[in-house]
Image: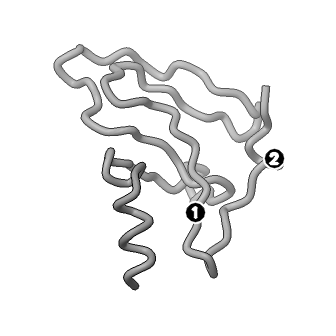
Amino acid sequence: MTNFNTALTCGDFAQGRLTAVIDVPMGSCLKIEWDWDACVFHLGRVEPMIFAKPVNYGFIVIVPGDDRDAGDRWQTLDDLGGRRQQRRAAQ
């Protein structure tokens, strides 16, 4: 299994790139958590389907906070397509 603690970086901020791991895909009711010490994912809990995630949800790599929890990130479909590139080019 990939050790995200060492395999990835936060990204290239100068180029506007941020590396995030999507650990809870859109529509999922599984709460998956990254264990920084064991370097593995584990199932935290199963939520009722009524609480299925409306967007991809994940964490920013190599940014554990004081509580050892990674920086959170959610991602919409708009983030995945050409519109993101257009916005970046327009800036």
Q: Where residue 59 sits in the image (x, y, percent)?
A: 52, 48
Residue 49 spot, x, y in % from top left: 23, 15
Query: Which image quadrant is residue 27 in?
Result: top left
Q: CA distance from mark 1 to mark 2?
A: 14 Å
Residue placed at 61% from the left, 56% from the top? 19
Q: How many marks?
A: 2
Does 49 sit above or below residue 53? above
Q: Counting other residues with Cα less than 10 Å from the Cα at mark 1, is it few (<14), some (14-19), or many (20 or more)?
A: few
Q: Say which residue label 1 marks.
A: 18
Name the residue at the bottom extreme. Answer: 91
Q: Residue at x 38, y 48 (%)?
A: 75
Q: Residues within 10 Å of mark 2 (few under 14, many from 20)?
A: few
Q: Is residue 88 left or right of residue 33?
A: left
| SS category of the residue bearing label 1 | loop
Q: Residue furthest left?
A: 50
Is 30 drawn above or below residue 84 in the view shown?
A: above
On screen, residue 43 versus residue 27, left or right, reads right
Q: Secondary structure at mark 2?
A: helix
Instruction: Give the quarter of the image for residue 3.
Output: top right
* Amino acid type, label 2: Ala
Q: Position of residue 89 (x, y in %)?
A: 44, 78
Residue displayed at 57% across by 60% down: 65
- Residue 7 disc label: 2
Q: Position of residue 24 (x, y in %)?
A: 44, 31
Q: Of residues 89 and 63, which is closer to you in this image?
A: 89
- Name the quadrant of the N terminus: top right
Residue type (three-letter) at the residue carrying disc 1: Leu
